[in-house]
Image: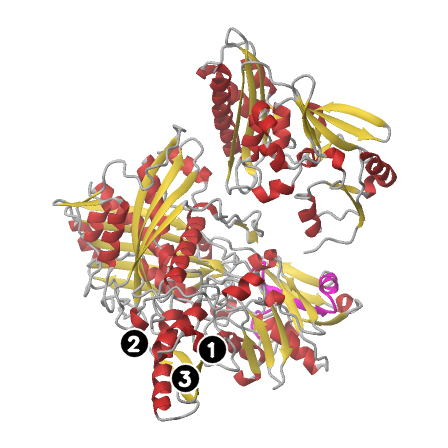
Amino acid sequence: MSSVGQSVLRIDARSKVTGEALYPGDFNLPNQAYMKILFARRPHAIIRKIETAKAEAVAGVLAVFTARDVPVNEYGLGIPDQPVLCGPGSKKPDADRVRFIGDQVALVVAETEEIAEKARDLIEVDYEDLPVISDPLDAIKEDALLLHPDLGSNVICHYQIRKGDVEEAFAKADVIIEGEYHTPGQEHAFLQPEAGVSYIDEENRVTVVVAGQWIHEDQDQISHALDLPHEAVRVIYPAIGGAFGGREDMSVQIVLALAALRLHQRGIDRPVKIIWSREESIIGHHKRHPYLIRTRWGATREGKVIAAKVDLLADGGAYAYTSTKVLGNATLMCTGPYEIPNVSVGSSVVYTNNIPTGAFRGFGGPQGLFAAESQMNKLAEALSMDPIELRMRNILRDGSLLSVGTPLPGKVTLDQVTEQCAQAGGWKKTDKGWTKPDGLRIDRARENQNPSVKRGVGFATGYKNVGFSFGAVESCWATIELRGGSEIEEAVLHHAGADVGQGAHTVFVQMAAEALGVPVEKVHLIASDTATSDNSGSASASRMTYMAGNAIRGAAQIALEKWENEERPAVGRFEFHPPATTPFDPQTGFSKPNFAYGYVAEIAEVEVDVETGQVHLLNVICVNDVGKAINPELVKGQVEGAVVQAEGYTILENIVQKDGYCLTPGLSTYLIPTIVDIPEQVETHLLEYADSGGPFGARGMGEMPLLPLAPAITAAVHSAIGVWIDSFPLTPERVLTAIKEK
Amino acid sequence: MKPASFEYYAPTNVDEALARLAELGYGVKVLAGGQSLVPSMNFRLAQPPALLDLNNVQELFYIRPTSDGGVAIGTMTRDSQVEHDALIKEKFPIIAAAMHFMAHPQIRNRGTFGGAIAHADPTAQLPAVVLALNGRMRIRSQQGERWVAAEEFFVGPFTSVLEPEELLVEVELPPTPAHSGWSYRQMERQAGAQALVGVAVMVSLDEAGKCRSARIAFLSVGETAVLARQAAQMLTGQKPTAELIHAAAETAANVDIEPGGDIHCSVEYRRHLAEVLARQALTEAFERAGR
């Protein structure tokens, strides 16, 4: 009997298909009131005055809340730099400023959504507009207006890496490649816009039913802003309609809790419900960081990369969110999966009046890797060397040192994913090394009659950390309760981890069943409620399977020991700590950045119409070392989902912001791939080289397949039409311009 | 979201429908397939006080040959029915080709042929196709009946010559002459989304292989579907050589149309696309005509 490695049916499959599963928007309570938020809808201004009398006078309005009503008017995952509500009257310095269009100014709670909306529109706000900074290059100018005067700088965070001597190495290099890369923002576009319900529960806790990625972090942020002890705040996740990093920061959590608490204090005990429209969702939550990356790489004629100098500048938008962590990842990834003896990196993320940027699947990795892999592909061209061959001469192996001076932990399989992906795509290994057959095609059956349509195949390799990086506190709890008499009748697993749609809860149950030696049907999961489970950390950083699996194994072992000792019920509670990591040294960047990694390589095949500039992604081959696929079908689903999201990122999706205003606030203007836009085939190869620290050998994998696709696609475009395109999305207009400039 | 409240009428024949239109005028909106109207009502962009639902008016669902060899399409005929109809396929294959780009199959199953014409969306395929096919519209009111050529029918974005008391009941497509050829070309960013540019082309050749007629109709380049008249004039009476087609496409893109720019597409790129697509479409259409 084995549960791990089986594609067991998702435990939530039936309820989601039949509609029984309740997402936050579906969750209703008797006698609930409805809330609407007044968003700033202007990018930079000081609020002189908020007049709420007319709104309060509307029949059916229960309350209007502003900054004065927030006990501690600040929040933020990294730096508490964001007011819960912007406006005068709170102690937070400069909380009377709005810094982006989605800043929240006032809350209206009413009998119906329509009344709340009508009253919201009657709130009068006296704004004094400030100059708008929409370009990060303007934000770092010496005389730039400060978005957060109290912080003294528009630079949120800066890192640097110094390894070896790059200038000396450039002097020795036979080939030098320079590039300037622009990577775009991206909207998470999860199916379920932000929504939730708040109420005071039977134990007098301010309770919020909402979708997020980390219940205990939500609880922490709410209790800080409301000035309540943790135990007075309860967070529950029902079914979650996608996250992708977009639910790591607060959206409706704090304001829902605030409304329920303040109503309660006024003697009104009614649940409060909110649902954001798609437009509110797009302006109201953060985006992927756009990056400007300038880089210079030097190599020997033999194809050994000896130097890399990289400067990165990221647009953090109005507030920090997870900017510091995203920047750390980009700083590490910008030299790619290669051992380069001389490296110099400088990276900064800055405040602007754009929509804040933060966590998004890949977390700085895709941005850094795009520059690195583009450089590698250009180097291969300059050296007349096959791109696989060049990679194999530089790839990180067991014991190789990263730019930050330490090796990757555990078994490194970048060589395996690279070679196996090349092989799957039709590359040949000869005595002279790897070669790509002329006119290589993945889809041999397809022929396009249009003579202006050219085909090309491109390659990229990547890797991504598992878990929190650079010294961040990292742990995960699990509790298992075994019930029965002579044999285990039921195993109850308590776990906080969020199932954001990826299938985490199913995988938890599988791993618990495996660790306990019982069938999955005997495992009962109680999940995602701060009242019943200990801190699991977030469903992010490709960490949930890895961290939860180790915690579950620990809890299972304790519970089984107690079971053997005849304890009934036998309860095992365990906190897993992975090996410690360390932050960047401020001068050299020396660090032990991560405790585990996953490895991935991808091939993209495209068609490019040279007359229109249209790029069409035909096929993708993804080779991903997942250590152990706990549930292979779910893993494949993650690969395919990541590929589609990466395709959107690279070709289609285009967030347009002008002077701090968003011109793409709906899914009719912000276009994402639909089922008719996605590649006809995603060929997934799962490799299972065990990670010694992973549960059952598993590595994380949720983000990895997103990383290499953008550079693989631009390499495929180059192989089709002979043009390097260093900015994306590959809008037809951009591609055509590049063709004309050739 | 849900629409604002509205009155609802569901007549079962045209006379009844026309009576209701005469009574309510601007106070009622005709509901055909509802694929554009209902979303805009749900978003509260449209808040008509009343809807006149034609889905029970059986006499408006038909595709039938006309005595001159053309085809008449009842206004309520579902797009997917037209798309897969054998007679349409035989006589007007350009319709099925254009419909491939029209939203998604689910929407075409419900959307109606006449509804898409009456809606007069400048980015829609069918107005341009009917313009290229030189179709005409049969319009009825309690006062009687009138016929309007496609060229006269569309007057602005989402605006046609239809008066509030009038109903578009039929679209009639005349037969195409011998040695005719067609082509439909379009480019969009996302499958099923608005075309950046689309072009429907109908040409015919005379016995000497010279262009007898050319109709080049664009979508997404102006306030209505636009006929490229000067380009057509350049071709008429001439041998359609590659050079001439090139020149005609250039004229079509630079003289006949006045496109605007938006976040998906600059004016320059839209003109470029118009030229490329017109050249490709004309080339293909003349090839087909010569077979």
| A713 w.r.t. B164: above or below | below
Quarter assignment of residue A589: bottom left
Numbered badge on residue A310: none
Q: Quick check: is A96 in the magenta stretch?
A: yes
Instruction: Please tell me how many numbered marks the rendered image carries.
Output: 3
Tell us which disc is closer to us: 2 or 1.
1
Give the residue type that dot 3 points to.
Ile
Query: Which residue appears farthest toward the top when viewing the image?
Result: B208
Q: Nearer the viewer, residue A710 or A439?
A: A439
Q: Residue at x 84, y 34 (%)?
A: B15
Q: Give the quadrant of the C terminus of chain A.
A: top left
Residue tagged 1: A524
Q: Report x, y in % for residue A376.
A: 26, 49
Q: Report x, y in % for residue B280.
A: 47, 25
Q: Residue at x 47, y 18 (%)?
A: B287
Q: Cα distance, mark 3 to mark 2?
A: 33 Å
Residue tagged 2: A579
Q: Are marks 3 and 2 on the same chain?
A: yes
Q: Secondary structure at mark 2?
A: loop
Tell us which disc is closer to us: 3 or 1.
3
Q: Cα distance, mark 2 to mark 1?
A: 30 Å
Give the residue type that dot 2 points to.
Pro
Please rate how many residues cluster around mark 3, counting C-alpha atoms within 10 Å: few if below 14, some from 14 to 19, many from 20.
some
